[in-house]
Image (spheres, helix red, strand yellow):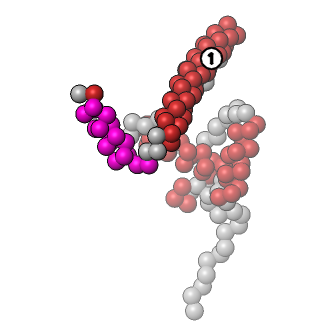
C-alpha cells in the first residue's frame, strides 16, 4: 500500500507554474474607483486573482501593439475652456450647415412633388392609361408638328 505524503498546510501556490505568488514583487498603482471596481468584477466573474486579470490584460495589449494595432484609445488630453468653446462653436456651425442643406433638399423634393402632381393630373385629364399610350400620343403629336 502506497503511503501518501504529508498534506501541505495553507493555500496552494497561486503563481505561474505553481510557484508561490507571495514571492512576486509588489506593485502599488493608483486607479480611479470605477476602474478598480471593474477589475474586481472581472476577477470575481472569472474566479481568478486580480493580478492574473491585469497580467492577461497587459499581455493582450502588448501583443496587439506588436501586431500594429492600438488596443487602447489614445489618452484623453485636457483641453482649456477656450478650446472647448471653440470646438462647441465649430460643431454648432457644422450642425447649422447640415440643417441648411436639409432645408434646401426638402424644398427641392417639394418642387419635384409639385411637378409630379401636375404631370399626374395632365395624364389623368388626357386619359393616358399606360406608358405605351403616352409614347404613341407623343409620336402622333411629333408627326403633326414635324
**Residue 77: in sight, yes or no?**
no
> Residue 28, position in %: x, y?
68, 35
Q: Residue at x 60, y 85 (%)?
A: 3
In this rendering, would 71 be left or right of 145?
right
Q: Nearer the viewer, residue 88 or 53?
A: 88
Residue 31 % position (x, y): 70, 33
Asked whether, in this view, residue 133 is left or right of residue 85, the answer is left
Residue 90 lies within the magenta run: no
Residue 8 in percent (x, y) is at 67, 69
Q: Please give the residue where the numbered disc 1 appears in the rendered image.
A: 96
Asked whether residue 136 is drawn in magenta, I would say yes
Q: Main secondary structure of the magenta part?
A: helix
Q: In the figure, is residue 78 to the left or right of 128?
A: right
Name the residue at the front extreme: 144
Q: Residue at x 71, y 67 (%)?
A: 9
Helix, strand or loop at mark 1: helix
Give the residue at x 34% y 47%. 132
Nearest the camera: 98 or 53? 98
Q: Quadrant of the C terminus?
A: top left
Q: Which range is magenta?
A: 129-144
Q: Which residue is farthest top?
A: 82
Residue 93 position (above or below residue 39)? above
Residue 88: quarter of image: top right
Q: Quadrant location of the N terminus?
A: bottom right
Residue at 69% over, 62% down: 11
Amino acid at each position: 500500500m502506497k503511503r501518501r505524503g504529508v498534506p501541505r498546510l495553507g493555500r496552494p501556490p497561486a503563481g505561474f507554474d505553481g510557484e508561490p505568488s507571495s514571492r512576486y514583487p509588489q506593485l502599488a498603482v493608483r486607479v480611479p474607483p470605477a476602474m478598480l471596481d471593474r477589475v474586481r468584477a472581472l476577477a470575481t466573474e472569472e474566479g481568478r486573482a486580480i493580478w492574473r486579470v491585469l497580467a492577461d490584460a497587459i499581455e493582450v495589449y502588448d501583443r496587439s501593439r506588436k501586431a500594429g494595432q492600438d488596443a487602447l484609445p489614445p489618452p484623453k488630453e485636457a483641453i482649456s475652456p477656450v478650446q472647448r468653446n471653440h470646438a462647441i462653436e465649430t460643431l454648432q456651425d457644422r450642425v447649422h450647415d447640415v440643417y441648411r442643406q436639409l432645408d434646401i433638399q426638402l424644398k427641392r423634393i417639394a418642387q419635384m412633388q409639385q411637378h409630379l402632381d401636375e404631370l399626374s393630373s395632365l395624364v389623368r385629364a388626357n386619359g393616358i392609361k399606360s406608358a405605351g399610350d403616352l409614347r404613341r400620343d407623343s409620336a402622333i403629336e411629333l408627326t403633326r408638328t414635324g
